[in-house]
């Protein structure tokens, strides 16, 4: 992302941010290109944050039409059916996002995310996906890794009052301050497929229960050919059966995935706006760090549950598991 300097207009508009993270970081942001797929509440919060931060461009993918559930936590869409009838989520959100910062190019890409080739993803520095199947997450992450340049890949999922972020920065070099000098650090990330394939018995004893529960729900939706979030409390018996099978295969006690947590994830698939703001804010912060190369990035899962108000970072990667 090396290239031309900030314009006089950009310097004036982003003056406060430049004072915080410097002109070079802002230049990197203003030259970056972000692809975002799956426009539910958490992702909308993220889009708002990075548009205000001053990235170069944001491309939106989501051909779904507006429903009452999708309106619940999406403040970009006017609650007037006459204004959104017949339009896709991406088109509606694009129109509203442009108003937040006219200097950021916001556009819409139609089509199925999984159908795009490596060349398409190479146009971007960051790819963020949500509201997609397990197989799509794996496929898109793999295509990003096959690109000729490093593409930062993120998945985000918010159900009930819980949220999860996954990060893959591949081999990531960044700078941080230690005492009175700047030092360079290198982190190696696992892909999404590699991370979730690690045997549960190899994970830390106090690993987040939300990590395990999300893997069960994700696997259930895949086996049943369900869309993400297309579940209800009526699915609990089948999910409990799957939990038992997975726990036995991984030599893990079923108590690590409580019924109460599964019930919440199955029954309350509508996002809570306050949780969307928290998860979307964390995701925006991480993407800004990845683009600017400043600050310790998240590695590689982040979980939030409003029931206890805690945010937890879990490093679930091949290198760590083997070590």
Image: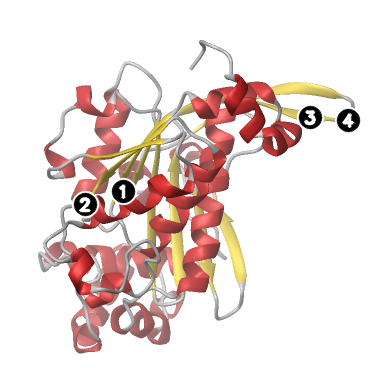
On the image, the x and y values in percent for residue 55 come to 48, 34
Tell whether 67 sits left or right of 283.
left
Residue beneath label 2, please?
A: 62
- Which circle's residue, 4 or 2, is located before the other in the chain? 2
Residue beneath label 3, please?
A: 177
Q: Residues within 10 Å of mark 4 (few under 14, many from 20)?
A: few
Which labelled disc corresponds to residue 137? Answer: none
- Which circle's residue, 1 or 2, is located before the other in the chain? 2
Residue at the (68%, 37%) spot, across then down? 17
* Mark in the foreground, 1 or 2: 1
Q: Tell whether label 2 touches label 4 (CB within 8 Å).
A: no
Instruction: Say what secondary structure mark 1 lies in.
Output: helix
- Which circle's residue, 1 or 4, is located before the other in the chain? 1
* CA distance separating discs 2 and 3: 40 Å
* Mark in the foreground, 1 or 4: 1
Q: Tell whether label 3 touches label 4 (CB within 8 Å).
A: yes
On the image, the x and y values in percent for residue 129 come to 32, 48
Query: Where is 97 relative to 12, above or below?
Result: below
Indicate the quadrant where residue 260 lies.
Answer: bottom left
* Mark in the foreground, 4 or 2: 2
Instruction: Say what secondary structure mark 3 lies in.
Output: strand
């Amino acid at each position: 992302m090396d290239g031309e300097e900030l314009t006089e207009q950009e310097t004036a508009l982003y003056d406060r941010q430049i004072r915080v993270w410097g002109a070079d970081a802002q230049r990197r942001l203003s030259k970056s290109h972000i692809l975002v797929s799956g426009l539910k509440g958490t992702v909308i919060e993220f889009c708002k944050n990075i548009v205000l931060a001053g990235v170069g461009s944001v491309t939106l993918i989501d051909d779904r039409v507006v429903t009452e559930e999708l309106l619940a936590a999406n403040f970009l869409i006017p609650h007037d059916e006459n204004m959104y009838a017949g339009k896709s989520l991406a088109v509606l959100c694009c129109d509203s996002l442009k108003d937040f910062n006219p200097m950021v190019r916001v556009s819409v890409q139609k089509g199925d995310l999984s159908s795009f080739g490596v060349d398409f993803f190479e146009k971007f520095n960051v790819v963020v996906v949500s509201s997609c199947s397990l197989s799509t997450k794996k496929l898109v992450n793999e295509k990003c890794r096959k690109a000729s340049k490093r593409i930062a890949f993120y998945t985000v999922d918010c159900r009930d009052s819980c949220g999860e972020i996954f990060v893959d920065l591949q081999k990531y070099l960044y700078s941080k301050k230690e005492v009175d000098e700047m030092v360079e650090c290198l982190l190696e990330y696992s892909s999404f497929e590699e991370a979730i394939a690690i045997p549960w018995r190899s994970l830390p004893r106090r690993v987040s229960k939300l990590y395990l529960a999300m893997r069960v729900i994700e696997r259930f939706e895949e086996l049943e050919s369900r869309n993400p979030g297309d579940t209800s409390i009526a699915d609990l018996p089948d999910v409990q059966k799957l939990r038992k099978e997975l726990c036995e295969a991984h030599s893990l006690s079923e108590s690590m995935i409580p019924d109460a947590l599964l019930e919440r994830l199955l029954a309350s698939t509508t996002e809570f706006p306050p949780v969307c703001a928290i998860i979307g804010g964390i995701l925006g912060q991480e993407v800004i760090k990845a683009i600017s190369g400043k600050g310790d990035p998240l590695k590689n899962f982040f979980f939030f549950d409003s029931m206890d108000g805690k945010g937890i970072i879990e490093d679930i990667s091949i290198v760590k598991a083997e070590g």
